[in-house]
Image (cartoon, grey):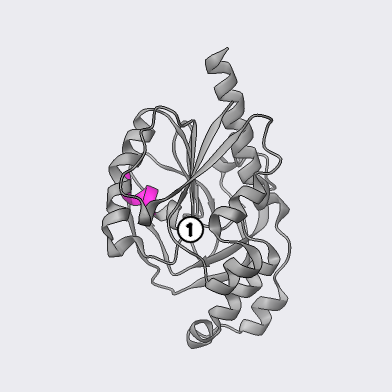
Amino acid sequence: MPRLLIVKTGDSFADVARDHGDFETLFRRALAAAPDGTRVAVLDAPRADTLPALDDIDGLLITGSHAMVSHAEPWSEALKPWLVEARARDIAMLGVCYGHQLMAAAFGGESDFHPAGRESGTREVSLTEAGRQDSLLGGLPARFRAHLSHAQTVLTAPPGARVLAANAHDPHQALRHGPRQWSVQFHPEFTPAVMRAYLGHQRQALQDQGETPERLVAEVTATPEATGLLLRFAELVSAATRLERA
């Protein structure tokens, strides 16, 4: 029975959480078809007094956040050595957006504001050669669409990390940090409705950097390939867990 822990690193907008579900709810929905017996728990990291022991965890999913990794909030900094230990134990990990940037910073890279500004909307992402051969991302098309909403990014990948996906805005759309440790800048848990809601909140910021919010909203579409990564991650964790305990 694989045990997955969703590490919640912040709250969504109040209206998005009300109408569509907060980050952890979106993750749970995407994992609804996970292999039988998969157990999913949630750690609300900003509000947690302590971090749980890693002994009873088979996989970590680190969510997005409205916080900024470079602000080095105490709860966020406390996660870094915990993630380093999890990688040393070869616990499977998948970081998303903030989780992607946090993992990169924890493992020796640099995450901060993107010099070209915010990237939002449904955008095209391309796999690298390493991505096409990867056990998690390798089943995706060479080019696929994904929902994005970020102002910060991974500026420098950690030593030894492999770049699995990129696009014109961001050369680090997906990274592999170890045998079973991945992170992605895009949001596989977002639905089109959630993406449109985020664009609504970002309207002024996008206009200020020369974007056309109406065009971005019109281009929002379903992203089944990207969304399927969460379930694929759960399947990989399940398969590995059953082998280890056989």
- Quadrant including the N terminus: top right
Tally of marks: 1
Q: Which SS does the magenta portion mostly show?
A: helix
The residue at the point 67 percent across, 81 percent down is 215
- Residue beneath the point at 73% across and 66% down: 221
Q: Which percent across, then down, holds residue 242?
A: 59, 20
Name above or below for residue 123 compared with residue 200. Answer: above
Q: Please say if 116 is above or below 143.
A: below
Corner quadrant of residue 241: top right
Which residue is tagged 1? 64
Percent x, y of residue 229:
63, 45
Give the residues in magenta.
Answer: 102-107
Q: Is residue 240 magenta?
A: no
Up-down relation of residue 168 to residue 232 (above or below): below
Let me know if residue 245 appears in the view: yes
Horizontal relation, residue 81 to residue 29: left or right: left
